Amino acid sequence: MSKRNPSVTIQEKFESMEYGPAPENAARVNEWLDENGRKFGHFIDGRMVRPKGAETFDTKSPSTGENMAAISQATSREVDKAVSAARKAQPGWAALGGHGRARYLYALARLVQKHSRKLAVLESMENGKPIRETRDIDIPLVARHFYHHAGWAQLIDQEFPGYEAVGVVGQIIPWNFPLLMLAWKIAPALAAGNTVVLKPAEFTSLTALMMADLLMEAGLPPGVVNFITGDGRVGQMLVDHPGIDKLAFTGSTDVGRIIRESTAGTGKKLTLELGGKSPFIVFEDADLDSAVEGLVDAIWLNAGQVCCAGSRLLIQEGVEDRFITKVKSRMEKLRIGPSLDKCIDIGAIVDEVQRQRIDAIVQQGKKEGASVWQPDCALPTEGVYYRPTLMTGVETSNVAAREEIFGPVVVSMTFRTQKEAVALANNTRYGLAASIWTENINRSLEIAPQLKAGVVWINSTNLFDAAVGFGGYRESGFGREGGIEGMYQYLKPAFYKKLKPAVNMPLPKVTESREPGAGDGLPALDQTAKQYIGGKQARPDGGNSIEIPDHEGRLAGIVGDGNYKDIRNAVEAAAAAGSWASAAGHLRAQIIYFIAENLSYRAREFETRLKTLTGASAKGAAREVARSIDRLFTYAAWADKFEGRVHSPPMRGVALAMNEPVGIIGIACPDEAPLLAFVSLMAPAIAMGNRVVMLPSQRYPLLATDFYQILETSDVPAGVVNIVTANRDDLAVVLAKHDNVDGLWFHGGTEASAEIERQAGGNMKRVWTSGDKAYDWFDTEQGEGRHILRHATEVKNIWIPYGDQT
Amino acid sequence: MSRTFESGGAKVTKLTPHARINRGTDFHADWLDSIRVNMSAVERRTGTVTGRRTVKKDWQVAWMLKAISCIDLTTLSGDDTPGRVRRLCAKARRPVRRDLLQAIGAENMGLTTGAICVYHTMVPTAVAALEGSGIPVAAVSTGFPAGLAPMETRLQEIRASVAAGAREIDIVITRAHVLNQDWAALYDEVRSFREASGAAHLKTILATGQLGSLNHVARASMVCMMAGADFIKTSTGMEGVNANLPVSLVMIRMIRDFHERTGQEIGFKPAGGISKAKLAVAYLILIKEELGNKWLSPDLFRFGASSLLGDLERQIEYHATGRYSAAHRHSMG
């Protein structure tokens, strides 16, 4: 210590006031790597397994280029072993009960804290992100996630009655937050009683493997969690594995789409956390200096390699110059360097491939007219780095404004009004997050619900908490992680196993023409049901009709033979009825009550129709109509009661979890209980503010076409409910391929559901299919309630820090 | 590592704390209209900046020496006596034990504190005790700490202190003007103090702990600078809440804004409650990040502190010897 000589040195430092190096100590991590021979296998059935002669690949530290260890590439044998270990362990893990599982999760939380520095250093080395981030953000959030979910495990019986674990869960995570994503995946899965096979990203497997040590230290039963390493091929094996009940994936939208397509029709439950191009909106009345810091957190956290990075900067035109000047001078202060230096802001890019991809988009964006600005900061000579980059003069059509760059690059554009800010913010296929900067609470709280994003931060950005759900709208994926909504992703209603097989009724030929007239010698008055589109009865575009027989084969009526153009028109009508989404729950309730009232006036008529068409008994028909009225009451009741939550994350402020409508939902109805099923699917959707395109039962469409007369007399605004008759499954595929349709409910057996799920992946629709099962719509537990309302809503979490009093 | 040297590596003693004074500007109400401060975001910045930046080893020592050079070594007590003030002045001249400075190779830097800060009555004693050292004497003034004496009394106090040799005047503003948002009245008040101070440096104490919100702190800062403050200072040390990082960040950002608007460089002085070396370094980091290296000098930055120096000395001893120190090993101020 006293061996410091040079007086010059201290004085020089006194004069220059530079920071100097501040390296984090990596000795313990290197010891751990050495103990493992710098060669790793998989964690299967409670132990590390290294298959002989296995193919391996090197994992490198991107900030130094140093080779850290050899990682094994799993084959189908290891994947099989891991899945069967998980399968074997699952019943025991579920039977352990909430408290038992809570104890393990609590132990994991404690272990993460006990080994926090080692985990932080390893994460920083392998990913290249600053130690400041892994130490102050990632690892504390990991511990928090295990604590929070120990709590959900403890409360599982009280808070989730009627639900049970999904089973064996396959999880695939990205390289940008390796350990945090691992925690986000395994904590809720374990809390709910599932067992797990997880594949870390090939660039960043090591913290998962270090975590395996902690799982063993916690004494987690063998097989409950398994880690298999390797590249995308291993991921695909996991996706395709028949032994998996659910898949949870975080990564790019492209890969998400492949997973959606691969799992189509398999009945695997799916959660996808995908890409984003999130807006960062700065109003003239914002605290501009703080907004600049917010932008630093938004786009330079983890070098912008963050799915919810605020990568599109929208500035109100009048403050653009001032704000951009401030941003540039702030960028001059950013320090880029080796990840283990405690004094840097931006570390390395995870891999050279990624760096090239970033630069390619920046260069293309420049060609398309953007100005590119970077501070003149020094970059380390070793390792993979990219300068923080600001692109101005970017138009909405610029590739850099549309594509997810996944790097330290922000593009900026301006807006004139609040309305234009929202329009620009939503002008993207993605919908993950948004950040709003204004000191006007009226403005911020008005905008937050208008943004198509699963997470909205007001005067803040990139805040996360285990209690607050995270996940996207649109092509940013579906499902939520964290919070109660995240728990439901790993649970299923216990009644699922009681569902009976679906019966699809083909449309029989009419064998006997018309019903006789009234006996006056004249023919019966022609009755031709039409499509119901935009509040009007419309003849089918194709000009063709379909004859519908009654249960004895006599002609019961004629419906329009709808085609893709009718679907197009119906979706357009639904899109034009957007104000339904913001109508008060009270108003929606009034209208649904009114539908029920009007149905009751015409109960006898519907009973007759049911008897004629289905051959139901008088009693059975009366029961179905009565239950339909009852069900309408149920959803009129829910319309103003299925409300969100107010979270209290660890900060001064709140996070509002709001239930928002999905948007436009296509609904294909089953043949069973044709009136009751139609009502049971339409009512929850519209009660929550969705607009629907109903595809009635193909066998019994006349009940739906009769129903539009009730809609017409019930003040349902035009376009909220649209009905298109014809070949249900074909039209469902058309709906699945329509990119302005946000959700699709398909209750029509498995035949078409694979194709529907495949096509729905195009814009990442929220799909709810009954698989090869049929709901019993007369059963209250199955036929109504929160489990259906959750399909009709998206949870948006709005973070609202507050405070002004010093 | 690139190094920038100010004025060819000038020694501390050559620094000229009173290079220029702020003549101020007209009163611009519109400069205040656009000020917005979001407290949560400000706290997030101050809560994370010290995680983003740190100094270690020799750099840490150098930064602690810098902190010492920026201290307004202060005694503001009813039982102050000439003897007590002389002891403090001696400490200001020689803030760190000579052997420690030798051990770290800093004995020839001419290290002193930034100033001595006392009540008016003690100004002549301090001026005499500091003669030849170049260390300025700062006098708290204008009815410190409440500032509610008659205006004429307050102005006279300033003039008397200047006449007695105080080169810096730490005034307190009328908090009522801020609380009632009577910005013109605040401007006029500080303007009068500016004029009364003559060539002495004017440091305006906002008493931020009594202003209610950061938005008030920001606006009051801007008004004081318009009215001719050379330094804006957080606290008297007597409020329930004294200097803290969020309040400081808000004031620092106003200094930056004022500089952008006028080209004038205004100094910043956090005061009260800063007693640990680690916190002092955190302040220096905040200044460096938000204002730049130029502000890391007693010209433009001061700590108003009495016990901070002791902790800095102990930390420096640890760095010099590898042994944790004790208060009694250092001369008391």
Image (cartoon, rainbow, N blue to C red):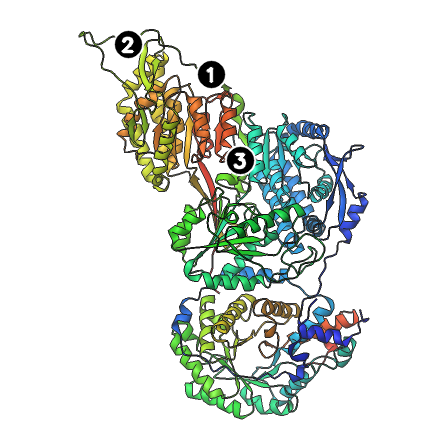
Q: Position of residue A399 (x, y in %)?
A: 51, 47
What label does residue A563 carry, if any?
A: none
Quarter of the image where one finds residue A515: top left
Q: As shown in the figure, which amino acid type bears the numbered disc 1?
A: Val
Give SS at disc 1: loop
Provide the residue designation for mark 1.
A503
Q: As shown in the figure, which amino acid type bears the numbered disc 3?
A: Tyr
Q: Is residue B283 left or right of residue B179?
A: right
Provide the residue designation for mark 2.
A514
User: Which quarter of the image is occupied by the C terminus of chain B?
Assistant: bottom right
- Chain bearing tag 2 is A
Is A83 placed above or below A801 here? above
Q: Residue furthest left?
A: A520
The answer to whether any part of residue A65 appears in the image is yes
Provide the residue designation for mark 3.
A488
User: Which quarter of the image is occupied by the N terminus of chain B?
Assistant: bottom right
- Chain bearing tag 3 is A
Q: Are marks 3 and 1 on the same chain?
A: yes
